[in-house]
């Protein structure tokens, strides 16, 4: 299996998520975001961009990532990574964050699974992806939304059309909250998403 | 008055802060360009919780020199990369339950005057926003707040023998409460007022 390489933004929550149990074992290598523009991505199976990165540093690596995707690379962009500065065809709509939606009577996150047959949902449930929202995307034509907010747009989609590679983009920011010891759903999301990612790479020989 | 420097981790983050009267004169810079500045001109340096601490390690010599000449460093977040000798890695509470998350006042300070502990311990009834552990203080630090159960010193003030002062908040940025509808909203303007009146601690 080609390696999963994570991008480390140097914050406390990146350190907790990437270098400590239980998730450190899922990352074969780690690149400091500041060094990403100079990194060799040739043999990377998946570039996992952890939540909340500096747009300045990601923009510096935009051409490098574009070349990687042009060669069939696989990029996962977690939430709050200033996507439009470094990924193609991003139509992102930030919204005000309501941290307290779940306190409302008859609370409804508004989230729905768009394709229950997708292999990701063998590893995680909608509940594992449910916490506050930072906004939504309008995915490009031909991309597949996996989780969306009813009557708004996608919070997690897979784009195999914008480049010869594969891009998964989400508004969800589990690395931040897991690394901050806050909100157990975010830890459960990683507990499902990371094993799924390894299984994907193993099965596809990426 | 000397300007205050805000290390800007992510564009757009904390944008509401900069609209406040008390914070409108902040100079902002990315953590990757600290070496382009003469830090000595700044009254205080504010480090938000989401800052790249590996960049602070690279700027450690400058930050140490800034403190030595009497500077004031306000650090927020969990210490992951101790970039000054006085800093030690964050220790989380043993369990994120109410038993360990109530904020307790140890030493009154002007920044927190009139701020109810209830409003620091809970936001809309939810606990844990203010902090979920602590950055261990050096000997001689004055503890301002601790968390219940383990007496974890979450906020502290330290006048360094070598010069300068560190104000530590071992949680999300202190100014996150600026728009709260509770007494916790007092923290931000009172922090900036205290910085304005801070007289320095040269060696």
Image (cartoon, coloured by chain):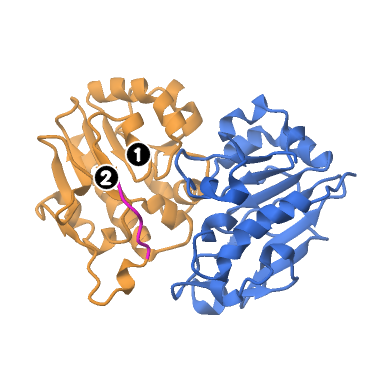
Chain colours: A orange, B blue
Between B96 and A87, the one lying in front of the other is: A87
Identify the residue at horizontal 39%, vertical 43% (top origin).
A50
Which percent across, then down, holds residue B160?
83, 50
Identify the residue at horizontal 31%, vertical 70% (top origin).
A102
Among the two numbered marks 1 and 2 on one chain, the one whose residue lies closer to the N terminus: 1
Which element is circle 2 on?
Answer: helix
Which percent across, then down, holds residue A72?
22, 25
Q: Is residue B65 left or right of residue B34?
A: right
Between A74 and A103, the one lying in front of the other is: A103
Is A187 contained in the magenta span? Answer: no
Chain ID, mark 1: A
Q: Is residue B80 visible?
A: no
Which percent across, then down, holds residue A152?
18, 51
Q: Are marks 1 and 2 in contact (CB under 8 Å)?
A: yes
Q: Is residue B151 visible?
A: yes
Which residue is denoted by mark 2 in the rendering? A197
Which element is circle 1 on?
Answer: strand
Which residue is denoted by mark 1 in the rendering? A48
Based on the displayed image, in which of its 4 quarters is residue A30 positioned?
A: top left
Q: Return the residue found at the far front.
A: B21
Is A96 contained in the magenta span? Answer: yes
Chain ID, mark 2: A
- How far apart are the alpha carbons under marks 1 and 2? 10 Å
Which percent across, then down, holds residue A150?
15, 57
First to last magenta residue range? A94-99
Q: Return the residue found at the far right.
A: B203
């Amino acid at each position: 299996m080609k390696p999963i390489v994570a991008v480390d933004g140097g914050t406390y929550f990146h350190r907790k998520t990437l270098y400590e149990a239980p998730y450190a074992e899922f990352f074969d290598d780690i690149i400091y975001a500041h060094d990403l523009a100079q990194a060799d991505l040739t043999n990377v199976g998946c570039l996992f961009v952890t939540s909340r990165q500096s747009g300045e540093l990601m923009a510096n690596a935009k051409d490098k990532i574009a070349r990687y995707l042009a060669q069939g690379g696989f990029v996962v962009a977690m939430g709050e990574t200033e996507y439009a500065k470094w990924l193609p065809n991003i139509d992102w709509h930030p919204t005000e964050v309501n941290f307290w939606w779940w306190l409302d009577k008859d609370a409804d996150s508004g989230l729905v699974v768009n394709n229950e047959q997708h292999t990701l949902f063998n590893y995680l449930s909608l509940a594992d992806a449910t916490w506050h929202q930072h906004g939504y995307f309008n995915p490009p034509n031909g991309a597949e939304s996996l989780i969306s907010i009813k009557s708004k747009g996608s919070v997690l989609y897979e784009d195999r059309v914008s480049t010869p590679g594969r891009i998964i983009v989400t508004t969800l920011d589990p690395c931040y909250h897991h690394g901050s010891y806050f909100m157990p759903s975010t830890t459960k999301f990683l507990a499902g998403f990371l094993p799924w990612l390894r299984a994907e790479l193993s099965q596809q020989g990426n | 008055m000397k300007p205050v420097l805000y290390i800007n981790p992510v564009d757009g983050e904390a944008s509401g802060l900069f609209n406040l009267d008390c914070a409108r004169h902040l100079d902002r810079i990315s953590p990757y360009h600290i070496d382009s500045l003469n830090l000595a001109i700044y009254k205080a340096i504010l480090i938000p919780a989401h800052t790249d601490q590996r960049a602070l390690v690279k700027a450690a010599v400058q930050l140490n020199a800034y403190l030595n000449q009497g500077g004031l460093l306000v650090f927020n977040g969990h210490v992951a990369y101790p970039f000054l000798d006085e800093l030690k890695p964050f220790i989380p509470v043993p369990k994120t339950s109410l038993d360990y998350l109530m904020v307790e006042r140890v030493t009154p300070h002007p920044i927190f005057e009139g701020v109810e502990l209830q409003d620091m311990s809970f936001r809309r009834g939810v606990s844990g926003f203010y902090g979920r552990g602590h950055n261990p203080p050096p000997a001689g630090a004055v503890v301002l707040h601790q968390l219940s159960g383990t007496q974890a010193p979450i906020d502290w003030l330290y006048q360094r023998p070598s010069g300068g002062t560190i104000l530590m908040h071992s949680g999300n940025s202190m100014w996150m409460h600026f728009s709260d509808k509770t007494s916790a909203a007092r923290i931000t303007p009172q922090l900036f007022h205290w910085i304005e009146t801070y007289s320095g601690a040269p060696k």
